[in-house]
Amino acid sequence: MAQNPSLTSERFHDLDAVRGLALLLGVALHTSMSFIEPQVWLLKDDSASAGLGVLFYVIHMFRMTTFFVMAGFFAHMLMEKRGLGGFIKNRLIRVGAPLAIFWPIVFASIIAVMIIAFAPPPGAPAVPAAPPPPLSAKTFPLTHLWFLYALLWLYGGAIVLKLVTDLLRIGGVLGRMFDAVVGCLTRTDLMGVVLILPAFAALSANPAWLMWFGIPTPDTGVILNTPALAGFTTAFVFGWFLHRSPDLLGHLAQRWWAHLPAAMLGTVICLNMVGLTPVITPVKGSEHPLYLALYLLTGWSWTLGLIGAAHAFLKRENPVLRYLSDASYWIYILHIPVVMGLQLATRHVAAPAELKFAAILLATVMIGLFTYQFMVRYSFIGAILNGRRRKAKPAPKGQATLIGDRA
């Protein structure tokens, strides 16, 4: 399919909002984890909530799949707009640099919180802590910034494929072939069935699958686990071809009303099959094919439905959503040490779990927004994350001022 020239310069306010939502939902997900019983997080609150466990379950179903679809979409747009050299430079600045800069700070902050959390009471003898596992390729702690690491691998794969197909002069032919396949499957609403196959195969072969937690998070080790690699690579590739065929967004916008109710129904059935309480006993994936297929299909229904609904209702720029979308990257990088610190401070407070969850989430987002506005947005950090911005100069009396124009 011929590339629409407008797609290389158009601002997709709707899909920016979806990407920002995926990141901000991560803050809610990690905030909920201290209230889940049995313990699944580094810190455990005295209060527990089955409802917050369900919230975690639902968010985890689709959040990262949705994020990687958006990552693939905007990666192709950037490649079309700036070419291979510009793409590499931009991704190293926007993704590689934040990983290199912020990972040591985030990791040190997490360690500091954990030292405080497990320190003995005043006057009590110190209990020797168990030695940490030796650092290796399998134990390296990527923390919640693993998604940046995974993106670098996906971008590297895209670069290699482009170089090879350009060298062999087969890029155009292969592109048109895959455009036709993706377009046909999407328009016939069969795409979800195909998209689940790589993750389904990987999880079926997994002898120690935690089925309540879906695709295992690859936050430890420099080699991504096979299910995550299969599932998120598929999402990235779909997003790449979604940008190549602009009419598919229109189709998703027309079908959101089918995808989202299907996602809700699938979620209810999955929870009925697996239970509301997290199951931390490993199982063999191939022994639960029906649940596995339905879980993955439901996750993709959430993803396709959210993208379609956003394209149907959020195409016009909204200043609030625009600002939140810009700030979401910084908030997500910052949030784990903040969330853990607040969880530590409130874990013994006698209050309902839902109230403490809401307070921690609100405080974390407000801290993120405050630091973004006054420390990041117009600084070199903001230039790395989102591009350089200049503060608007005071406008002459009677003229409107556009605040925060991108330089």
Image (tube, rainbow, N blue to C red):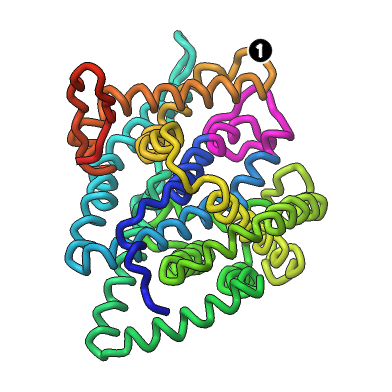
Quarter containing the C terminus = top left
Nearer the observer, 87 or 351: 87
Kindly identify the residue that appears in the image at 59 percent across and 72 percent down.
186
Vertical position of residue 351 compared to residue 400: above or below: above
Q: Position of residue 110 (x, y in %)?
A: 39, 33
Q: Which residues are magenta?
A: 28-53
Kindly identify the residue that appears in the image at 50 percent across and 42 percent down.
21
Kindly identify the residue that appears in the image at 74 percent across and 53 percent down.
261
The residue type indicated by label 1 comes to Ala
Nearer the observer, 259 or 293: 259
Vertical position of residue 399 compared to residue 269: above or below: above
Q: Position of residue 103 (x, y in %)?
A: 30, 42
Vertical position of residue 382 compared to residue 262: above or below: above
Q: Is residue 377 left or right of residue 278?
A: left
Mark 1 surroundings within 10 Å by alpha-carbon count, few (fewer than 14), some (14 through 19), many (20 or more): few
From where the camera sits, is residue 142 visible?
yes
Circle 1 residue: 350
Give the quadrant of residue 108.
top left
Q: Residue furthest front?
A: 398
Vertical position of residue 45 compared to residue 198: above or below: above
